[in-house]
Image (tube, rainbow, N blue to C red):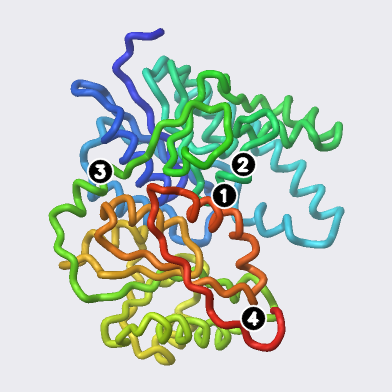
Amino acid sequence: MTYSKKNAYIVKDTKTYIYAEEAKFKLAQKGDINILFIVIPQITNNRLKERMEEMILQNNEWDEVHWVFTKSNSTVYHKIKGKRNNLTKKFIKYREYYYNYIDRFRMDQKFKKYSPCRFVISTHKNTNEHLASILTPDQLILVDSGHRVFKRVNKSGYIDYSERIMRRSRADRILFKLSGLSVYDREKTALFTIYGDDLETRHQIIENGFDHQQYLYRSKKVGKDIVWISSPFYKMSENISIDDYIDYIKSALNMLDVDIKNLTYIPHPGKQSEEEIRYIKKQLSCNIDDRDIPVEMKIVRYEHLPSMCISPFSSSLANIYKASEGRISMVSAWHPEFSPFRIWDDWRESVEANKKLNIKFIDIEPRNSEI
């Protein structure tokens, strides 16, 4: 065990930044040196760098902040994975291993000097995992990825992306090894999550009770406003139109007897265009909160906390419930007719079984045929 007082926090977006703040609030000790690493692709199309800069400016409690711009994991790479041209897909995939090698080499050269650390907070993305590994912590603590955490645990009982790669082709296995990316010892890797009671894993569980957010929420009174947190599932199926989505919202609001003048719609960052947001605002005649910060931070910055948050499916419902200590009513408006909801069946089951969460599920009446 090292006697270092350095702690590292490796984040990839605004959501994981919130989790890093929570981990710091819960785990860091007085006198520790807390170092933030922001690892984001050089090529991204959703103002990620600007959004992260805004977040950092609002918190000057970091002893050091380091930006790491990677060639790996760009929006170009993720878009091409859905293309049908196999030759193009293979070229992009194999080029990605070369980018992994470049990123690994640069991180080794620049950041090994920060080793060792008492603990490292990180996501399970490949470049972030490597950076965590070279910082040689006494313990690596992974933050979860919302509801997707249930699908991340492998048969080994651990979250380890490299296991999936080693089940791919021989070329994949060789190129991954040549890239030099490393994964930290899983027996020394814990998981920081709100879903610990429901997750079957060999990781040590450290409960994310949203203690920091609770501290901020406690100063706020609950008002009359209602917030709709968008999960634009009409983007997930060609058979679902934006008008279907709006009709669904109206049905849910009618079931809950919501006064539209009290409604604020929060769009999903990066997934809804300005034109779509304007159209939704016109059809619902509601307020729009399109500030480019995480939902959890939007809520706490209102003059009063909303009395209710509604969403089709969103891990933010669980996060806000924890942060508000149950003072805000949480509702998931479930529409089994729409196919995207099936992806979230596991999330619904885990939430309903979790005695520490009180999220109400309402089932929207189906129409004539499945979509």
Amino acid residing under circle 1: Arg
| Identity of the residue drawn at 19% across and 23% down | 30
Secondary structure under the numbered disc 3 in the rendered image = helix
Number of the label disc, if any, that sits on residue 212: 3
Secondary structure under the numbered disc 1 in the rendered image = loop
The CA distance from mark 2 to mark 1 is 7 Å
| Identity of the residue drawn at 22% across and 65% down | 305
Location of residue 156 in the rendering, given as x and y in whole percent from the top left corner = 68, 28
Quarter of the figure with residue 337: bottom right
Number of the label disc, if any, that sits on residue 152: 2
Amino acid residing under circle 2: Arg
The CA distance from mark 4 to mark 1 is 23 Å
Secondary structure under the numbered disc 2 in the rendered image = helix
The CA distance from mark 1 to mark 3 is 23 Å
Viewer-proximal residue among 332 and 88: 332
| Identity of the residue drawn at 44% across and 40% down | 193
- Kindly tell me whether residue 268 is visible in this rendering: no
- Counting residues from the start of the chain, the first of labels 4 and 3 encountered is 3
Q: Residues within 10 Å of mark 4 (few under 14, many from 20)?
A: some
Q: Please give the residue where the numbered disc 1 appears in the rendered image.
A: 148
Q: Residues within 10 Å of mark 1 (few under 14, many from 20)?
A: some
Which quarter of the image is occupied by the C terminus? Answer: bottom right
- Kindly tell me whether residue 222 is visible in this rendering: yes
Q: Is residue 146 left or right of residue 175?
A: left
The CA distance from mark 4 to mark 3 is 38 Å
Label 4–label 1 contact, CB within 8 A: no
Number of the label disc, if any, that sits on residue 240: 4
Amino acid residing under circle 4: Ile
| Identity of the residue drawn at 73% across and 42% down | 95
